[in-house]
Image: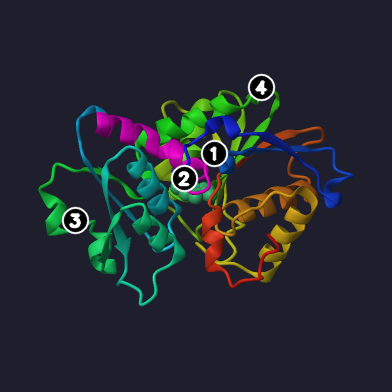
Amino acid sequence: MQAINPYNITVDKVILPELAKRNVHIDLLRLDKIHPVISGNKWFKLRYYLDEAVHAGTKHIITFGGAWSNHIVAAAAACKMKQLRCTGIIRGEEPSTWSATLAEAKAYGMDLHFSTRQDYANKIIPAASANDNARIIPEGGYGPQGAKGASSILDYCDGSSYEYICCAAGTGTMAAGIINAAADKKVLAFSVLKNNHDLKPAIDSLLTADKKFELNDTYHFGGYAKHEPRLLAFMNHFFSHTHIPLDFVYTGKLLFGVTDLIRNGYFSEGSRILVIHSGGLQGNASLPKGTLIF
Ligand SMILES: *Cc1c(COP(=O)(O)O)cnc(C)c1O
């Protein structure tokens, strides 16, 4: 199995023709390059949960996610690497055909347990796993350990020259970790869910100091994992100029939002922005073949 390699992370300059006249500089922190499956922020969010489990002698991890969850497949692969048993509790009835994500998680040895939406919402643990002294990792790695892991993302670049750091937010764990580590930078987190009023309190409760950040919720494209032709067209356009692939659930929306805000004059002249490419590319397999040019 391919090892995780944070030293593959690069900082890539983003040059797009429509931004040529704008005096705003975008660098992309390529967390997608650490591993093809445990891609992006998921390894950062999992690392302390897994270290703690190994340290405590726990042999079994239980976690939660949907059928296309980047977190589920990353947890499956990371547990295999650490030789931990892993149970994935999957939201909804078992589909007649498994998603590529679930098939891959299974291939890494994850025990999949399909849970009705109601049981999932109540975080019911299947009886077979209940008395196993297992360590439970919340959905998306949300929690102080997840945020602490996400704080280490900024160790892989020299952040000193940026005024802004932009990232996508689902549970807000990564955003909280980045805000905690970002010192005086302005952090702008782009919500990928529609009307998620829980996001701000979710981030607030993981902050280690009273820090300012901004949430943007205008680029969700209809909601979580929803998309529109103009989003997919933008991702193809972005790839054709940068050769950098984006995913349609998180980073596509993030870069669409950042470039749109640049065009609207949101960032002041001469600003330098660090944008986090948080990975998630495996999720593009849920799109019809040929939708994306990469
Ligand atoms: C999970 C994920 C996020 C969201 O991270 P949160 O910590 O849940 O906010 C962002 N980008 C990608 C690619 C992801 O897979």
Disc 3 to disc 4, how far (Cα)? Answer: 44 Å
Q: Amino acid at mark 3?
A: Ile
The N terminus sits in image quarter: top left
Q: What is the crowding at mark 2: few (fewer than 14 residues within 10 Å), some, or many (at least 20)?
A: many
Q: Secondary structure at mark 2?
A: loop
Q: Which residue is mark 3?
A: 125
Q: Secondary structure at mark 4?
A: helix
Q: Amino acid at mark 4?
A: Ser
Instruction: Name the side, left or right, on which 73 lies relative to 56.
Output: right
Q: Which residue is mark 1?
A: 34
Disc 2 to disc 1, how far (Cα)? Answer: 8 Å
Do the numbered discs 2 and 1 sit on residues whose CB atoms are within 8 Å? yes
Q: Nearer the viewer, mark 4 or mark 1?
A: 1
Residue 83, quarter of the rendered image: top left
Q: Which residue is mark 2?
A: 38
Q: What is the crowding at mark 3: few (fewer than 14 residues within 10 Å), some, or many (at least 20)?
A: some
Q: Nearer the viewer, mark 3 or mark 4?
A: 3
Q: Earlier in the sequence, mark 4 or mark 1?
A: 1
Q: Which residue is mark 4?
A: 160
Q: Nearer the viewer, mark 3 or mark 2?
A: 2
Do the numbered discs 4 and 1 sit on residues whose CB atoms are within 8 Å? no
